[in-house]
Amino acid sequence: MKGKQAIIDKIISDARQIAKSTHEEGVQKAQEIIDAAENDARIYRAKNREESEKEREDIIRRRITAANLEVKKILLKAKQEIISKAFSQSVEEIRKDKKAYKNMLLGMLEHASNGDTLIISKNDKDILTPQDVKDFCQKRKIDISIDTNYGDFLGGLILCGKGWDKNFTLEVELNSLRDELEPQIAQMLFGDN
């Protein structure tokens, strides 16, 4: 029985040795899996942090760009308002010197043709009188009529002919000057190119 017991003891001892070895191998494999998972998690966190940081920087950059564009739009609008106000005030300046303004209106009237109808601005009815128009017509030997309704424009006049109208309102005259002069005015006022 001793031999039999020795064999059983050897089998049990080998089984314990194999179990211990398998257990240690399992623990080692488990630790390797845990270490790999922890490493993957660190890489994932670092990658996400890096991507999040890039995304945050992109968002900030886009918002700064949008804010700069909005500021430029606001500045442009303010500049346009200033230039518009300057042109509006120029109408008042033009009309200040009544004699020079009346001469300007008579200069506009030089474009009249025989048979035209003259529309005078309601603002100019006391500056360019029917007598002034009558004197002008006698001097030029033409016949024009004066519309009894005054025009609703800032100043100047309109000559209505058979085939076309000639618009010499201050609005039209200043707008044509504005197209030409606005870049120069902007340069003078704001240093813009």
Image (spheres, rainbow, N blue to C red):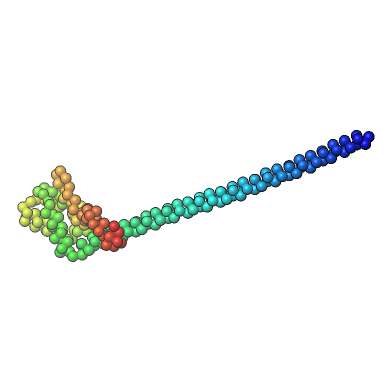
Q: Quadrant of residue 164?
A: top left
In the image shown, does 110 or 72 lie closer to the viewer? 72
Q: Note whether 13 is above or below 65 in the view shown.
A: above
Foreground pick, 7 / 126: 7
- Residue 134 place in picture, x, y as percent: 10, 56
Which quadrant of the figure contains the N terminus?
Answer: top right
The structure residue drawn at horizontal position 20% and vertical position 64%, both measured from the top left corner, is: 96
| 112 over 14 or under it: above or below | below
Residue at the image position 9 percent from the left and 56 percent from the top: 136
Residue at 19% over, 56% down: 156
* Count of marks placed on residues: 0
Quarter of the image for residue 12 reads top right
Closer to the camera in the image, 3 or 21? 3
Name the side, left or right, on which 64 lies relative to 32: left
Can the viewer see residue 158?
Answer: yes
Q: Residue 161: horizontal and vertical position, in percent?
A: 14, 46
Image quarter of residue 29: top right
Give the quadrant of the C terminus.
bottom left
- Outermost residue on the bottom side: it is 97
The reply, left or right, for residue 44 in relation to residue 161 is: right
Report the side of 31 relative to 103 (left or right).
right
Q: Where's residue 118, x and y in %?
A: 15, 52
Asked if residue 175 can be seen in this view, the reply is no
Q: Position of residue 76 (x, y in %)?
A: 34, 56
Closer-to-camera residue (146/108): 108
What residue occupies the far right of the structure in this picture? Answer: 1
Q: Residue at x 65, y 48 (%)?
A: 38
